Image (cartoon, rainbow, N blue to C red):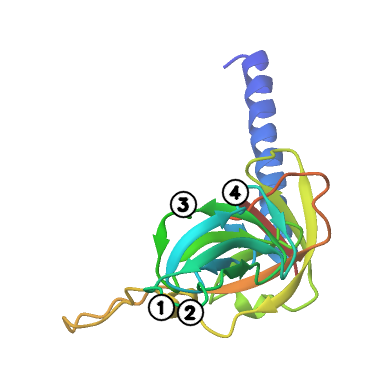
């Protein structure tokens, strides 16, 4: 092997060692200082607007994108029932917004007949959204209320939101599953559970975030 090839080989080995050292240092620093997960989403308080009586939906203002304040009239229902001769006609019943919010989904159809309790629309307060991150139970002891958090929204690469840990769940996410796991066969396989952690955002930084968006969070230990 000539001297030139030997020098080139030594340079390559040196670069590999240096690169590996930097990679190990980066991994160690991140594992010690941060807890990261992509099992997280933007969420908020979902509010259901439901029919308040049986009858005909005579008016509806709650189209998708419309904003309402708590108590604002969204629609009206003409109650069902046979008219009694000589009696006054049934009064119109108002449907009011139960909270501040923006309509994000609508199933109401004007002039259709509805039953009391029928969901007509869904609302979110888009100015009060947060992040729910599902942290593995083996790492939950590293999470404390008030810790700083970096939030990376998949829909806006290159942008970083900031927030703080606001609340740590008191039950695993699987506890509320519609189909909880069972052990009917007698063969038990342990599965790592996740605990929901609520992260309060400092601000949106002009990003049009909406409930359901995927995010990656990095919690500062």
Among the two numbered marks 1 and 3 on one chain, the one whose residue lies closer to the N terminus: 1
Q: Which of 111 and 16 is in front in this view?
A: 111
Residue denoted by label 2: 87
Residue denoted by label 4: 63
Among the two numbered marks 4 and 2 on one chain, the one whose residue lies closer to the N terminus: 4
Residue 27: quadrant of the picture: bottom right
| Distance of label 4 from label 2 (alpha carbons) | 35 Å
* Residue closest to the far left: 185
Q: In the figure, 22 relative to 174: above or below? A: above
Among the two numbered marks 4 and 1 on one chain, the one whose residue lies closer to the N terminus: 4
Q: In the figure, 132 relative to 126: above or below? A: below
User: In this rendering, does residue 106 appear at all?
Assistant: yes
Residue denoted by label 1: 84
Among the two numbered marks 3 and 4 on one chain, the one whose residue lies closer to the N terminus: 4
Question: Which residue is at 59% across, 68% downward?
Answer: 95
Among the two numbered marks 2 and 3 on one chain, the one whose residue lies closer to the N terminus: 2
| Distance of label 1 from label 3 (alpha carbons) | 28 Å
Residue 166, horizontal then vertical, whole percent? 74, 75
Q: Do the residues labelled 1 and 3 touch (CB within 8 Å)?
A: no
Q: Which of 16 and 215 is in front in this view?
A: 215
| Distance of label 4 from label 1 (alpha carbons) | 35 Å
Residue denoted by label 3: 109
């Amino acid at each position: 092997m000539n001297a030139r090839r030997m020098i080139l080989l030594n340079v390559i080995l040196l670069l590999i060692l240096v690169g590996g050292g930097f990679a190990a240092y980066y991994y160690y620093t991140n594992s010690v200082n941060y807890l990261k997960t992509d099992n997280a989403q933007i969420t908020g308080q979902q509010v259901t607007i439901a029919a308040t009586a049986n009858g005909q939906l005579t008016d509806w203002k709650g189209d998708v994108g419309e904003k309402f304040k708590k108590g604002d009239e969204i629609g009206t229902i003409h109650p069902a029932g046979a008219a009694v001769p000589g009696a006054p006609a049934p009064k119109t019943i108002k449907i009011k917004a139960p909270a501040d919010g923006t309509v994000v989904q609508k199933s109401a159809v004007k002039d259709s007949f509805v039953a009391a309790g029928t969901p007509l629309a869904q609302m979110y307060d888009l100015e009060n959204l947060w992040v729910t991150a599902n942290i593995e139970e083996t790492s939950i002891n590293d999470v404390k209320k008030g810790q700083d958090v970096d939030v990376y929204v998949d829909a806006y690469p290159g942008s970083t939101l900031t927030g703080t840990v606001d609340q740590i769940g008191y039950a695993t996410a699987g506890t509320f599953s519609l189909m909880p796991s069972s052990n009917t066969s007698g063969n038990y396989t342990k599965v790592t559970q996740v605990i929901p952690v609520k992260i309060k955002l400092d601000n949106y930084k002009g990003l049009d975030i909406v409930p359901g968006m995927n995010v990656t969070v990095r919690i500062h230990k």
